[in-house]
Image (tube, coloured by chain):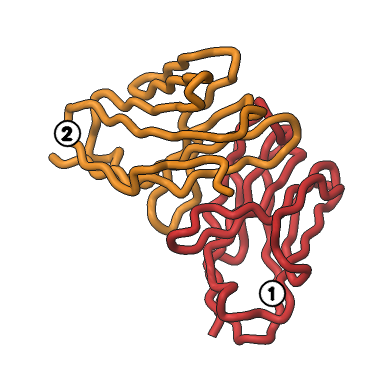
Chain colours: A red, B orange
């Protein structure tokens, strides 16, 4: 099976712009989660989608949003970019999400905001 | 409030010896625990998991131990190899809640 893919892999944006990141989960997986990783902060949970519905949301401002399509592919959007949004954004897919189901990560999108 | 803690930011071990990575948690509702390995500029790779109904799970060189009364889990790697050098994250969840990750431990295996 193909793994989780994320596009683009690298992105440079200017403060104030918006950005859309894409994630294609492993075939058959219905849960997609997004995380932000910054140096020293570990993986911070953004949100999880299951069957096109947002099931969980982390403690991030409303500038961060996401959606999931009927084929389980997911996108996340960050509007009005700030310098502090520079990070590695990771997507993970799971058969059903939640306890008992492993999450498998994509390679990430490295976002740099200047 | 950090629900999952990895108190050792780094660990150095000689090749061939045992690596022991530790993780503590505070939420007694957690019932599923996982370990991930991460190389720079890559996504985390799933290593091994354990359900709260077990106290040990083994997969090749990797063994995870769970001590529910102490709210502690550990990952043992035997024997350690240079390719094991990476950052290791433990994570936990329950029900449909999202995974909560520790901040990671950087393992260096010295040849």
Q: Whole-Å distance between the Cαs marked 1 and 2? A: 44 Å
Question: Label 2 is found on which chain of the structure?
Answer: B
- Quarter of the image that includes the N terminus of chain A: top right
Q: Residue at x 56, y 80 (%)?
A: A83
Q: Residue at x 48, y 37 (%)?
A: B90
Q: Position of residue A38 (x, y in %)?
A: 50, 63
Q: Residue at x 24, y 25 (%)?
A: B79
* Residue B11 sits above or below residue A90 on the image: above
Q: Secondary structure at mark 1?
A: strand
* Residue B86 sits above or below residue B67 on the image: below
- Horizontal side of residue A106 vs B67, given as left or right: right
- Horizontal side of residue A16 vs A12, given as left or right: right
In the rendered image, is residue A28 in sight? Answer: no
Tally the marks: 2
Discs 1, 2 touching: Cβ within 8 Å? no
For residue A29, the mark is: none
Q: Nearer the viewer, residue A39 or A49?
A: A39
Q: Secondary structure at mark 2?
A: loop
For residue B15, the mark is: 2
* Residue A45 sits above or below residue A64 on the image: above
Q: Position of residue A42 (x, y in %)?
A: 49, 53
**Residue on which disc 1 sits:** A19
């Amino acid at each position: 099976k193909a793994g989780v893919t994320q596009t683009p892999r690298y992105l440079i944006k200017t403060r104030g712009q918006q950005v859309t990141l894409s994630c294609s989960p492993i075939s058959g997986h219905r849960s997609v989660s997004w995380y932000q990783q910054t140096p020293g902060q570990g993986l911070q949970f953004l949100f999880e989608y299951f069957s096109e519905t947002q099931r969980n949301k982390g403690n991030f401002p409303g500038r961060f949003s996401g959606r999931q399509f009927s084929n389980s592919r997911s996108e996340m959007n960050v509007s009005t970019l700030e310098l502090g949004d520079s990070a590695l954004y990771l997507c993970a897919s799971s058969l059903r999400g939640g306890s008992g189901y492993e999450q498998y990560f994509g390679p990430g999108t490295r976002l740099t905001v200047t | 409030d950090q629900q999952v803690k990895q108190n050792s930011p780094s660990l150095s071990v000689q090749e061939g010896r045992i690596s022991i990575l530790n993780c503590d948690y505070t939420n007694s509702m957690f019932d599923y625990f996982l370990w991930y390995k991460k190389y720079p500029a890559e996504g985390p790779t799933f290593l091994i998991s354990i359900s709260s109904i077990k106290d040990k799970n083994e997969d090749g060189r990797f063994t995870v131990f769970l001590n529910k009364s102490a709210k502690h889990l550990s990952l043992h790697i035997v024997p350690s190899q240079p390719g094991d050098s990476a950052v290791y994250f433990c994570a936990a969840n329950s029900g449909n809640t999202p995974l909560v990750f520790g901040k990671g431990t950087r393992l260096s295996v010295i040849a």
